[in-house]
Image (cartoon, rainbow, N blue to C red):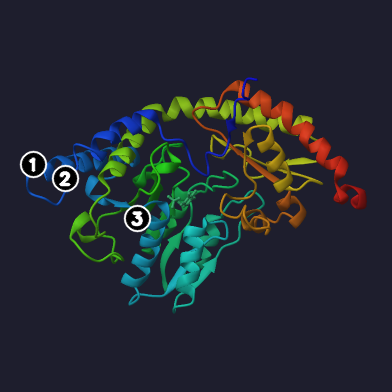
């Protein structure tokens, strides 16, 4: 029997490492093993590879290379930005503005600070998950030291009005951080156009390796390090650099810069085909997030009278990998806090399904999802106690 082709549609959770990235990393896992801090040629070879990677990342987001600090991933970059500015600017104020739809990396960091003398305002979002820049403006007090709003939401794909918020932050003289982990490498991200002071990215969301990321820090931004030790990364992040991973992030950035425009176009066409197909074939289904200003690879739908978990398991049996809510909350039975913040009922939040497409996704994959999903949903609805008691 020929094994069924498995279809991976969970690129928002992680992406496969590009073979070109793996190839670029390999020498740094063997022959080129020097410590970048060493003066000898072994060290200098490693150092120049890391600096070349830094240039590529800076080019991708329109930054200067000295404004890029390597981290151990997106979570660390978010922690660094938020705790680093909070503790460096305590003298100025203790107020942080954020949103209820942030990734855990931002949300939990703000919660941590909230218990330690900081005040946190969580802004409302509308039913598409959009933040209103005017709400940001209204929330600013003379104690505000940081605004943190994500660039694109990992669950529903909504792209936030970052440039407008950046303008407000700049006028008020307040630092502005954005978690751009889902945006970098997928849509154009330029730090000056966005007006951000700090921006977090992660390699494994753009076909690079896991456990490496970067924080962009605009020149002049006051923030303290939270890793202490050696003088690496201009004293901003101590510890011997993970050179192979950094080289991988550099290569992934180079590939993204080269292919982003054409790839986004291709994905938007597949995305819209899948959205329209699902809406057409499945009664009582709703799109979550903005219809157009959304990530090119994100489809998030709520399907009435079925549980997201059941849909996931049944799709997995058919070889299709998707997600319900966020990858982080799928092990708990709580519905997605992002969907609840957008005003969805618990039932609709529980019945959510996310497909996130990627470079390997084909027209055939989309056709297969459209063939399999209505069948699974019809079967689940036939067994659903919600349907029987509800109608
Ligand atoms: C994945 C993700 C992160 C965390 O990045 P890691 O590299 O996995 O730590 C943060 N924010 C968003 C929006 C993400 O999607």
Q: Residue furthest left?
A: 40
Badge 2: residue crowd in 10 Å (few <14, some 14–19, many ≥20): some
- The mark lying in front, picked from 2 and 3, is 2
SS type, badge 3: loop
Cα–Cα gap, marks 2 and 3: 33 Å
Where residue 81 appears, as percent x and y from the top left, is 37, 60
Vertically, is 13 above or below 174? above
User: Ligand 1 closer than 8 Å to the CB at disc 2?
Assistant: no
Q: Residue furthest front?
A: 1
Gap in angstroms between the C-alphas marked 1 and 2: 8 Å
How many residues crowd around disc 1 within 10 Å: few (fewer than 14), some, or many (20 or more)? Answer: few
Q: Nearer the viewer, residue 52 or 175?
A: 52
On the image, which quarter does residue 57 sit in? Answer: top left
Q: Is residue 360 above or below residue 346?
A: above
Residue closest to the eye, 91 or 360: 360
The reply to whether callout 1 and callout 2 are in contact (CB within 8 Å) is yes
**Residue matched to label 2:** 34
- Name the side, left or right, on which 313 lies relative to 15: right
Q: Nearer the viewer, residue 346 or 194?
A: 346
Question: Where does label 3 land, which residue?
Answer: 197
Residue 283 can be seen in this image: no
Which badge, 1 or 2, comes first in the chain's sequence? Answer: 2
**Residue 373, visible in the rendered structure:** yes
Name the residue located 47 percent from the left edge and 71 percent from the top edge: 112
Q: Earlier in the sequence, mark 2 or mark 3?
A: 2
Q: Locate residue 21 relative to residue 350 in the image: left or right.
A: left
Disc tally is 3
Disc 1 designates what residue?
Answer: 41
Q: Nearer the viewer, residue 175 or 326?
A: 326
Density class for disc 3 (Cα within 10 Å; few <14, some 14-19, many ≥20) is: many
Chain-order first, disc 3 or disc 1: 1
């Amino acid at each position: 029997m020929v094994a069924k082709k498995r279809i991976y549609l969970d690129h928002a959770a992680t992406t496969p490492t590009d073979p070109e990235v793996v190839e670029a990393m390999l020498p740094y896992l063997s022959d080129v093993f020097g410590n970048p801090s060493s003066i000898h040629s072994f060290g200098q070879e490693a150092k120049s590879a890391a600096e070349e990677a830094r240039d590529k990342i800076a080019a991708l987001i329109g930054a200067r290379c000295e404004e890029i600090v390597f981290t151990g991933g997106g979570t660390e970059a978010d922690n660094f930005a938020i705790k680093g500015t909070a503790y460096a600017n305590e003298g100025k104020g203790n107020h942080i503005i954020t949103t209820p739809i942030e990734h855990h990396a931002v949300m939990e960091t703000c919660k941590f600070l909230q218990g330690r003398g900081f005040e946190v305002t969580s802004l409302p979002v509308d039913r598409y998950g959009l933040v209103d820049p005017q709400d940001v403006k209204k929330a600013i007090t003379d104690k505000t030291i940081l605004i943190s709003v994500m660039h694109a939401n990992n669950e529903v794909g909504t792209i936030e009005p970052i440039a407008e918020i950046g303008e407000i932050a700049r006028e008020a003289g307040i630092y502005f951080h954005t978690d751009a982990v889902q945006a970098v490498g997928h849509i154009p991200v330029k730090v000056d156009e966005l007006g951000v002071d700090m921006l977090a990215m992660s390699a494994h969301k753009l076909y690079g390796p896991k456990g490496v990321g970067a924080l962009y820090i605009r020149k002049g931004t006051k923030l303290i390090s939270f890793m202490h030790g050696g003088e690496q990364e201009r004293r901003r992040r101590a510890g011997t650099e993970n050179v192979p991973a950094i080289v991988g992030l550099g290569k992934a950035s180079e590939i993204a810069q080269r292919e982003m425009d054409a790839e986004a176009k291709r994905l938007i066409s597949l995305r819209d085909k899948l959205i329209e197909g699902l809406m057409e074939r499945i009664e009582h289904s709703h799109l979550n997030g903005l219809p157009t200003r959304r990530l090119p690879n994100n489809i998030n739908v709520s399907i009435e009278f079925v549980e997201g978990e059941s849909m996931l398991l049944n799709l997995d049996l058919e070889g299709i990998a998707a997600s319900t809510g966020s990858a982080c909350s799928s092990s708990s039975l709580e519905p997605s806090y992002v969907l609840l913040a957008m005003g969805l009922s618990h039932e609709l939040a529980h019945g959510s399904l996310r497909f996130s497409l990627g470079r390997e996704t084909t027209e055939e994959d989309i056709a297969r999802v459209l063939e399999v999903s209505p069948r699974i949903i019809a079967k689940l609805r036939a067994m659903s106690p919600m349907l029987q008691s509800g109608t």
